[in-house]
Amino acid sequence: MKRTLARTARTRAEPTIALINIVFLMLIFFLIAGSLAPQPDTDVTLVSLTDITTEPPADALIMLADGSLRHAGAALSQDAALAQFRTVARVRLLPDRAAPAGALVALAQGLRAAGVTELVIVTERGLE
């Protein structure tokens, strides 16, 4: 009787060591690449914009703190504003910080319903 040995399939071990080495090398590469970035000169003093007064864009619709509207220096009612901006595709809206939120939302919805496709609400960027 002759016995034949059957070969059993060997499972290959996962190459975890190679994977760890690659991740480690990538980590070292990004640490070195980040530290090699040129630093700005220390002799340069950057411009400060705190003393500059800015004006809103001339074509902007302004909402004051009491909810009233202005455009190009003239007072507008909400119906007049909707009629005036009906054909404009893009409207810039500058609400006052103390403007009532309900009036702002109602105006935005009215402008969208009137046909304004892009409504940009201009805000002030904080320092934080």
Image (cartoon, rainbow, N blue to C red):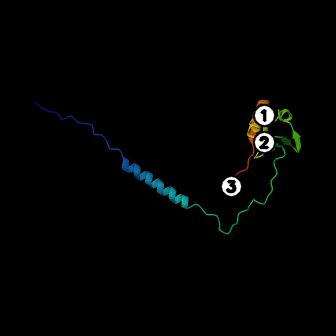
Q: In whole angstroms, how far apart are the C-alphas of marks 2 and 1?
A: 10 Å
Q: Quadrant of the C terminus?
A: bottom right
Residue at which label 3 appears: 127
Residue at which label 1 appears: 111
Which amino acid type is marked by label 1? Answer: Leu
Residue at which label 2 appears: 93
Tell me the residue at 86%/34% (across/down). 80
Q: Earlier in the sequence, mark 3 or mark 1?
A: 1
Q: In whole angstroms, how far apart are the C-alphas of marks 3 and 1?
A: 31 Å
Residue 116 seen by the camera: no
**Which residue is most to the left?**
1
The disc placed on residue 55 is: none
Q: Earlier in the sequence, mark 2 or mark 3?
A: 2
Q: Secondary structure at mark 3?
A: loop
Q: Quadrant of residue 118?
A: top right
Q: Position of residue 82 (x, y in %)?
A: 83, 33
Instruction: Locate residue 40 relative to residue 50 in the image: left or right.
Output: left
Q: Position of residue 84 (x, y in %)?
A: 86, 35
